[in-house]
Every structure is written in C-alpha cells, then in structure tokens.
Image (cartoon, helix red, strand yellow):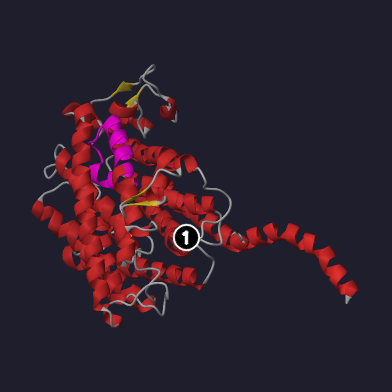
Amino acid sequence: MKRRLAFSLYLLPLVLLAAPGLAWAGEAKVDSGDTSFVLISTALVMIMTLPGVALFYGGMVRRKNTLSTIMQSLFIMALISVQWVLWGYSIAFGPDKAHLFGSLAWLGLNGVGQTPNADYAATIPAQAFMAFQMMFAVITPALITGSIAERMRFPAFVAFTLLWATFVYDPLAHWVWGMGGWLRNLGALDFAGGTVVHISSGISGLVAALMLGRRKGYGTEPMVPHNLPFTVLGAALLWFGWFGFNAGSALAANGLAASAFVATNTAAAAAALSWVCAEWLHHGKPTVLGGASGLVAGLVAITPASGFVGPMPAVLIGLAAGVVCYLAVSVVKSRLGYDDSLDAFGVHGIGGTLGALATGLFASRLVNPAGADGLFFGNPHQFLIQLIGVLSSWVFAAAATFVILKVVGLFFKLRADEDEEVQGLDFTQHGEEAYSDMVLGAPLGTMSGMTAAAPAVKVSAKGANA
C-alpha cells in the first residue's frame, strides 16, 4: 500500500506538467484531411474570379474593352485580398456588435492564427477559414462588373469596390454567417452565398447600371460578344471552381461536402439544358452563349441550397433557374430597357433570389441535420424566413450601393465620356489593347508592354472597334 501511494505521488507532478498540453490538444485539434480539403477549395474559388469571371466577362464585351474588363477582376483580386486581411474579415466574422457587424478586434488578423475557431470550424486553422471566406469576398464585387462593363472609369471603379466591400459585403456576410448576425439568429439558410454573394452583387449591379446609364449606342448598334471561346472557357472554369465554392462550404471532407458537390453539378447541368431549350423554342436556334449562361444560372441558384437539398430538388432548381433567368435576360431586360451589360442582375440577382426562396421549399434535415426543413417537408415558416432574408438583402444592397456611388461621384467622375467610350476603355483607361491588329506601327505581340510613354499610332476609333 505504501509503495502504491509513493508511486502515485511520484507520478502526480508528471501528470500535472502534462495536463496543460493535454488540454490544449483537446481544445484545438486540427484535422489534416479537413484542412487540405478547405485549402484546395479555397484555391478553386480563387480560380472562379481569376481567370473564371475575367474570361467569362472578357469574352462577352466588345474587343476594345477586353483588357479593361479582365483588369477589373484582376485588380479586385489584389485589392480585396488586402482589405480582407486588414479589416474586412473582422467586420464580417469578428465578435458581434448589435447583430449587424463584427467588431474591429481582429484587425490585421489579430488573434486569427493556426488554431481553430470552434465557432466557425472546429477542425481547420482559423486562417484556413479566413482564406476560404476571403475568396467569397473577392468574387462578389467581381460579379458586379458585369453590369457596369464598358463604361465606368477606373479610378471610380476602385473607390466604389473598396467602399462596397466594406459597407455592403462585409456587414451582409456577418448578418448571414457571422456569430450573432441577425439573419443567422433568425434561422435563414444560405449554405454558400445566395444572399451574401449573388443577390448582393446582382442588385448592386442593377443599381449601378441604372445610375451610370446606357452605353453609347445601346439598342441601336450591335454589341455582341467579341470572343465566345473566351466566355465558354470562363464558364467552364466557373463550373470547376464552383465545386470548391459549394462543397467547400461544408468546411470538412465529409458526406455533406459530397452531397453539395452532387447537387451543384446536377443543378448546373439541368439549367444549361433548360436555358438552351427555352432559347431554342423562343428564337429557333440553340446558342453556345445560352449554354454557358444557363450553366452559370444553375450554379447561382443552387448555391444557397446546395448543403440542404438532395439530387432531385437540385434538378428542379436547375430547370427553373435556366428558364427564369433566360426570361429575365431576354424578355424583361429588353422590355424595361435597362443596360445590364453582361446580365449580372438577370443571372445573379434573379438566380440568387430564386435559389434562396427554393431553399425554403426544398431544404431537408435528412440532408443536413444542422439546417431546417422547408415548406415541402412540413415547415412553411422556413420559407417566410427565407423571404425576409431575400427582401432585406435586396433593400440593403440597393440603398447602400446608391449612397456609395453618390459619394464616389463627389470625388471621381463615374462614367467615361463619349470619346473615351467610343475609343474603348482598354486604350483610354489603361493605354493598352488586347489585340495588336488594332494598332498601326506596333509589332505583333508587343501590346502588353506598351505604355503611355511610348504610345502606338491608333486607328480611327469608330472603324477599329466595331
């Protein structure tokens, strides 16, 4: 007995010394599989913006605006990556303030390190979660550029993007995803960004398009895509990256991620089919642009629902998205006469709204026990919650975008003047051109290095940029 007591007293200091390490390991255990999955998903979402959106939009504009459109996606990638680290992440996911935004406690990623934050993801480093969410913050303002393409001056675009990310995206992300956010507390379901990403960008794009006004010659001159292969390549990269967007939002390599992956692909395929069929019936011919636009519409619509619905609801959501977004782009826009250049509102605003509401219909706890049942599974209250989320996102994004553009307009000229627009924003805003055959006296392949200090001789703007 004495020997056992002595042995126990001998071991006690060793146990006490080991206890802090044991407690730490229990509190913050990083899972290498989950971490790898989220980091790969982060890279996939990055591809969605650059080169995905850049090529998708870059191919749809006229050739004189190719580089300026691509530059917007490239610059947003750089600008928001820095903004997110400095203050954006703290506003979106920091400690709650009044259920509207996060505090500035995490400025410069203070306290956001290699151990998990169990409030958001218990098995991956906090910085991995931060980086994944950063790519969502990057792509959202990039989507807006589809509505303002070919007519917004670059200095105003930079100021608008920085202010919009800070005062629209970051607070809205906190509402829906941040701990304590009022829409999260209400029970709104948005698995990967129907309200936060697509409704906010689509509605903001429409407001910006209305405030800037139509492009010169809109409705009287042809404004067809100059490079559809670019657009299809961009759409393919979006489809590819969207698996990281939706499946990655499970934040773990698990069954829910697999379910979201299947729902994402299924809805994209169904929407591509329904858009092309609707276009075929309406105009008599199926187009490549219609197929590309349709698959993106399906991806948009399934985004909020992807982690809450099974394969068959995904088919229905995709089929509906293809038809509804096609009608928004081909019928509603032409009748109302607004110039949403590349249909950011028609695809993202309308598709995101449809998807958010469909989540309230088809969501099932059999798919995701952490979610809720929708109307078709016995819970009509969830549809009402989704409707509140949609309406609040519409109103907030529209009002805030209007105010931000008014403020930016006090310091910068928002829109290119008529001569700049005729020449094209590539040349007037950046001193470059995408295609060397547009310039006299410049050797083939040298245009990317041309600067204002060594300008080439430009041909007549009207003749060269049809």
Residue at 45%, 49% (x, y): give it.
46
- Residue 217 in sight: yes
Instruction: Give the percent coordinates (x, y) of residue 252.
Output: 52, 65
Q: Which of 24 and 222 is in front in this view?
A: 24
Within 10 angstroms of label 1, few (less than 14), some, or many (20 or more) residues?
A: few
Q: Is residue 153 left or right of residue 31?
A: left
In percent of the image, x 55 and y 48: which residue is there?
113
In magenta stretch: residue 385 = no
Q: Is 168 rendered above or below residue 41?
A: above
Magenta span: predominant SS is helix
Of residues 118 and 176, which is closer to you in this image?
Answer: 118
Given the image, on which type of amino acid does mark 1 rest?
A: Asp
Q: In which quarter of the image is residue 219?
A: top left
Residue 72: x %, y % from top left: 35, 39
Left or right: where 149 falls relative to 7: left
Where is residue 215 drawn, in percent x and y? 17, 39
Q: Look at the image and tell me in which quarter the C terminus lies.
A: top left
Above or below residue 284? Residue 447 is above
Report the front residue among 66 and 338: 338
Which residue is at the far top?
453
Q: Give the range drawn in magenta.
A: 142-166
Q: Which residue lies furthest to the bottom in this view?
A: 378
Q: Residue at x 24, y 35 (%)?
A: 152
SS for tag 1? loop
Q: Height in image: 422 above or below 161? A: above
Q: What residue does disc 1 label? A: 119
Looking at the rendered image, the quarter that the N terminus falls into is bottom right
Work out whether 336 lies above or below 281. Answer: above
- The answer to whether residue 340 of the structure is visible from this angle is no
